[in-house]
């Protein structure tokens, strides 16, 4: 059975303190791994798609990487406006499954 | 601007009442989805539709119903058979194959009166 596990559940950082969020997965045939950002009371906003191990995508202070078992979302020098829940999802076969998310708090 | 519009933003249901959540998209996407989001859990799939006049049950379809009479519209009815309907409901759409990301509306929060 395909599974997605995100860690940590919550992460508190000081502004400028870089860190990484983890998405561990098991899947029989990865079709795509997706990262989303979700603000309170809003729908998830698409960030990145990764398709194969070794692939990396970057956008402003965010960088997503992929191995055969994990994906990381690296946040470099975060700002308070980066505070949100970050969701990882993957499609194996024809079904997309979502992790429970990591709540990120960045303090000024 | 193209996007997905969900309405209402907040909805209250009385005992024994059916309520309908609206989802409209102008992205010309074929596939549409309904998810339920509860605190501490990943999004769970309720129903999905790949084309007009066709839809399939997801993992938690009991107590819910949908229709897909138009490409741009995919309403979700929460029936009185759904005994624990309090949740955040998200509608999504996708263009292309399952290797493409889904795009989401801003959700409807349903509560019990």
Image: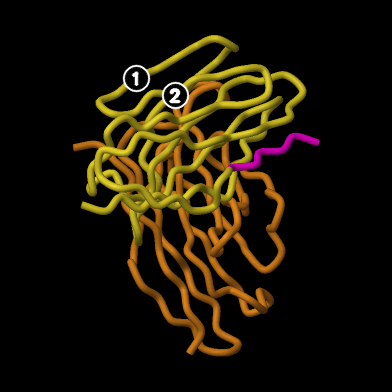
Tell me where residue A13 appears, x and y as whole percent.
Answer: 35, 48
Q: Is A64 on the left or on the right of A42, as rendered?
A: right
Q: Is B97 on the left or on the right of A108, as rendered?
A: right
Name the residue at the right extreme. Answer: A1
Q: Quadrant of the N terminus of chain B?
A: top left
Chain A in the picture: what colour? yellow
Relative height, residue A50 to residue A7 (above, below): above
- For the point 66% across and 20% down, the residue is A30
Give the main secondary structure of the magenta stretch.
strand
CA distance for labels 2 and 1: 6 Å
Q: Which residue is mark 2?
A: A64
Q: Nearer the viewer, residue B80 or B68?
A: B80
Secondary structure of residue under mark 1: strand
Res A58 → quadrant: top left
For the residue carrying disc 2, how many other residues have a C-alpha within 10 Å: few (<14), some (14-19), or many (20+)? Answer: many
Residue contact at pointers 2 and 1, CB within 8 angstroms: yes
Label drawn at residue B50: none
Chain B in the picture: what colour? orange
Q: Which residue is mark 1?
A: A58
Relative height, residue A48 to residue B91 (above, below): above
Q: Are marks 2 and 1 on the same chain?
A: yes
* Chain assignment, label 1: A
* Among numbered discs 2 and 1, the one appearing first in the sequence: 1
Q: Nearer the viewer, residue A18 or B42?
A: A18
Q: Which residues fall within the magenta stretch?
A: A1-6
For the residue carrying disc 1, how many other residues have a C-alpha within 10 Å: few (<14), some (14-19), or many (20+)? Answer: few
- For the point 62% across and 54% down, the residue is B46
């Amino acid at each position: 059975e395909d599974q997605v596990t995100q860690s940590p559940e919550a992460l508190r950082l000081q502004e400028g303190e870089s860190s990484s969020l983890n998405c561990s997965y098991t899947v029989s045939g990865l079709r795509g791994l997706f990262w989303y950002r979700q603000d309170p009371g809003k729908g998830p906003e698409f960030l990145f798609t990764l398709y194969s191990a070794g692939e990396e995508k970057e956008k402003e202070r965010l960088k997503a990487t992929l191995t055969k078992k994990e994906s990381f979302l690296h946040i470099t020098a975060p700002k308070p406006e980066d505070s949100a829940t970050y969701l990882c999802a993957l499609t194996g076969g024809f079904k997309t499954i979502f992790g429970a998310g990591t709540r990120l708090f960045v303090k000024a | 601007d193209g996007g997905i519009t969900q309405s209402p933003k907040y909805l209250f249901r009385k005992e024994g009442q059916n309520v309908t959540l609206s989802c409209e998209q102008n992205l010309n996407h074929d596939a549409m989805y309904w998810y339920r989001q509860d605190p501490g859990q990943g999004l769970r799939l309720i129903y999905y539709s790949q084309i007009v006049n066709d839809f399939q049950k997801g993992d938690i379809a009991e107590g819910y119903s949908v229709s897909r009479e138009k490409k741009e519209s995919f309403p979700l009815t929460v029936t009185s058979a759904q005994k624990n309907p309090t949740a955040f409901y998200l509608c999504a759409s996708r263009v292309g194959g399952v290797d493409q990301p889904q795009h989401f509306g801003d959700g409807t929060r349903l509560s019990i009166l």
